[in-house]
Image (spheres, rainbow, N blue to C red):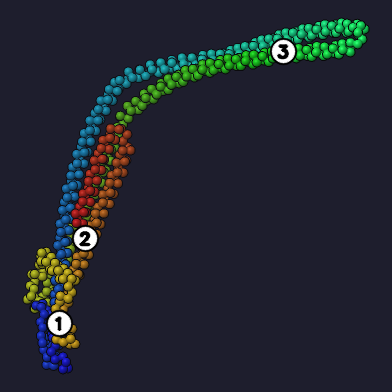
Amino acid sequence: SPQSENVPLSISGLNGTLSLKRPNTANQKLLSKSCEYQSVVNELEQEYIRFLQKQVEQQLLDEAEHARQQKLLQSQLKKHEYIEEVKQHHHQKIESAHQKYEQFKRAVEREAQMKEQNFGQFTLKLQQMDQQQQKKLREAEIARRQDEQFRAEYRENMQLLREKQAQQKMNQLEKKHQSYSEKRMQQLKRDQVKIEQQKQKVDQKLQQAQQMQIQKLKQQENESLYISLNAQRIYQEISQQKEKHLQKIIQKSKSQLLKVDQKNQIFKQKFQQNQNEKEQKLKQKELQLQKFNQQKQIQKELQLQEQKELSVLKQQHASLFNNYVEQQRVERAMQLEREKFEEIERQKQKKQEMEKQMYQQRSAELQVKNFLLEKKFEDLPDSIKKIVPQESILNLQKEEAMQLIKQQMINDTVQSVNPKSKQQPRQTDKNQEIPQIQTTQQTAEKPQKQIRKDCKKKLEQIRANYNQNVLEIMRLNRERQSVRDETLRKVESLEAKCQLQKIFEKEQKVFEETLENLRKKLKQDEG
């Protein structure tokens, strides 16, 4: 068309971009051919970049595998050295324990000889002590029977005395009360006689007065009424005085009787208090007797304890002779532990041999892959072979690989920060624009992701190995703990138990140190 006579053409390749201005009418074929050529060049570049990435990844994997194998060899050497040190330490412990056991056995034999020498004297002393104890027991039994008889007689006598005294006092009180009541009745009778005599005297006086009044009435008839009234009034006054006097006498007698009753009650209270005090004294005496009996029982218990201690000494004397057999059992258990340890070491050696075989197989597979890569390089076109030689592809060093990775990361960052930094097409007119033909270079995301995946896999392998080693060590520790418990159960002597406990504590410390070293190594490997 006439509007698109001058079209900008941009070609991007290895050496940058090439911009041209050609008339569209005369150079359509050249443009199509240049586009085809550019697409072929881009495909070749992509294939070459992929090939380089694969080579770099393979080289990194090989180097990581080689480093891992070296670390495994070093860890195996360290483990072997550590196992040898533990074996030496264990053998030294066993030798020292054996020496201590021999010393202990000699001391036990000496003690046994001394005890055998003194055993006759000891038996004689025991017989004498038994005889003395029997005598003491007989005497104590006789004294106990006498005490019981005395207590029974004392109780019976005290009961009889109490009953007699109470009866005597009650009789005395009854006699006193009867005598007092008799005296009181006599006094009342006397008072009544006196009252009757007074009544008679008053009656006589009244009669005399009446006679006098009659005479006076005869003499004085006018004063008869007055005299009669006075006589009646006098008679009433005299009768009132008599009643008052009688009431006073009765009240006095009642008050005296009440006082007597109060005295009797006070006497009874005092009598009961005396009886209570006597009973308390008897109880105190009984408590003293109980304390005396308790002291006797304590003496008997002490004697029984002495007999038990003597029996315990005899048992210890017998157990000392059995310690030698128990120590032999301990040595057998230690021998079994050594055999288990040797079996574990054999299994570890087998595992190491299997790992070596796997390493050899892996190295053979890598050699085969390198051979295939060489064949692929021969199949590449001559243009790529001229640009990059075979040695630089197959023998990529670590530094070159790291430089390539860094360059790819720099390109990724530049593209992410300034995505418009690529070459833009030149614009002739506002309405005349043709899209730019350019090759999108491969970013370094794929190799970075692959490296991350490989690192994650390696970390998982390291952690799995660590967990497996820890589980194996814990299993061995459980087995050893069971053997230790069995040996401690079989051993009865305290000294042998203490020695074994010290040895087991040292082994436990070594076990904890190994776990700590494994944790440190895991942290180093993770770093």
Q: Position of residue 419 (x, y in %)?
A: 18, 74
Identify whether 128 is placed above or below 477: above
Identify whether 336 is placed above or below 215: below
Element type at mark 2: helix
Please tell me in which quadrant of the rendered image residue 482 appears: top left
Q: Nearer the viewer, residue 323 or 371?
A: 371
Query: Disc 3 marks which residue?
Result: 253
Name the residue located 19 percent from the left edge and 69 percent from the top edge.
445
**Tag 2: residue type?**
Lys
Q: Nearer the viewer, residue 48 or 496?
A: 48
Name the residue located 80 percent from the left edge and 13 percent from the top edge.
237
Q: Which sits earlier in the primary sequence, circle 1 or circle 2?
A: 1
Q: Which sits earlier in the primary sequence, circle 1 or circle 3?
A: 3
Q: Position of residue 448 (x, y in %)?
A: 19, 67
Element type at mark 1: loop
Q: Nearer the viewer, residue 468 or 267?
A: 267
Q: Classify residue 450 as left or right of residue 30.
A: right
Q: Which sits earlier in the primary sequence, circle 3 or circle 2?
A: 3
Observer-side mark, 3 or 2, equals 3
Q: Is residue 415 visible?
A: no
Please tell me in which quadrant of the rendered image residue 335 appears: top left
Query: Disc 1 marks which residue?
Result: 425
Find the distance from the CA under tag 1 to the CA under tag 3. 158 Å
Name the residue located 92 percent from the left edge and 7 percent from the top edge.
218
Identify whether 469 is placed above or below 125: below
Name the residue located 17 percent from the left edge and 66 percent from the top edge.
365
**Tag 3: residue type?**
Ser
Q: Classify residue 416 as left or right of residue 175.
A: left
